[in-house]
Amino acid sequence: MRQLSVIWAIVVVLGVLLFAVFRLAQHSWVALQMPLGWLEYSVLLINTLFMAYSEGYKGFHLSFAPRFAARVKYVYQQGQGVQLWLSPLFCFGYFGTTKAKQIVAFALTILLICVIVLMGYMPQPWRGVVDAGVVVGLSIGVLSMLYWLLQEYKQLAYLHSPEVPQLS
């Protein structure tokens, strides 16, 4: 049961991120086929670098991905009941963590939904220019998650805290 829960958590979370990468890449591709001026190219470059650093490196590689990998390891080693049944939500941090991490998880989800809705109203090429940065950030995030999952798998002890209250 624990193995299935781990596989389910990894497939769901990575699947959601990869789905977003492929959907947003389509908007970016459309924008890059349009004639862009210096302003659009400048925003594309700056936004892409900013998102690679802030979302990909700081957000995913240093924060979310190591915690996600540790929580996946926790599910495999010690997960019980609802943690197993709802392992994608547990590993994402919606429950079974500190109150602060739960608030951050829900707040980020609500914020992302709002941004996604608003981005639907943005005209091309600007939508694609902005989405290109998100594609880069999410791609770094996916690679970071795979990296940290592999690192946790290779170690007996936790490399990062899964931030489960009884362990913290």
Image (cartoon, rainbow, N blue to C red):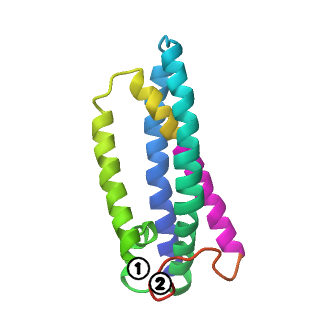
The answer to which image quadrant residue 87 occupies is bottom left
Q: What span is in magenta?
A: 136-154
Mark drawn on residue 42: none
Looking at this view, is 9 or 112 the one in front? 112
Looking at this view, is 25 or 44 the one in front? 44
Q: How many other residues sit within 10 Å of disc 2, few (<14), some (14-19) or many (≥20)?
A: many
Pointer 2 and pointer 1: residues touching (CB < 8 Å)? yes
Question: Amino acid type of disc 2?
Answer: Gly
Picture coordinates of residue 66 (x, y %)?
A: 58, 66
Residue in view at x 47 percent, y 53 percent: 15
Label 1 belongs to which residue?
Answer: 83
Label 2 belongs to which residue?
Answer: 79
Above or below residue 143? Residue 103 is below
Residue in view at x 69 percent, y 68 percent: 151
- The furthest residue to the right: 154
Q: How many other residues sit within 10 Å of disc 1, few (<14), some (14-19) or many (≥20)?
A: many
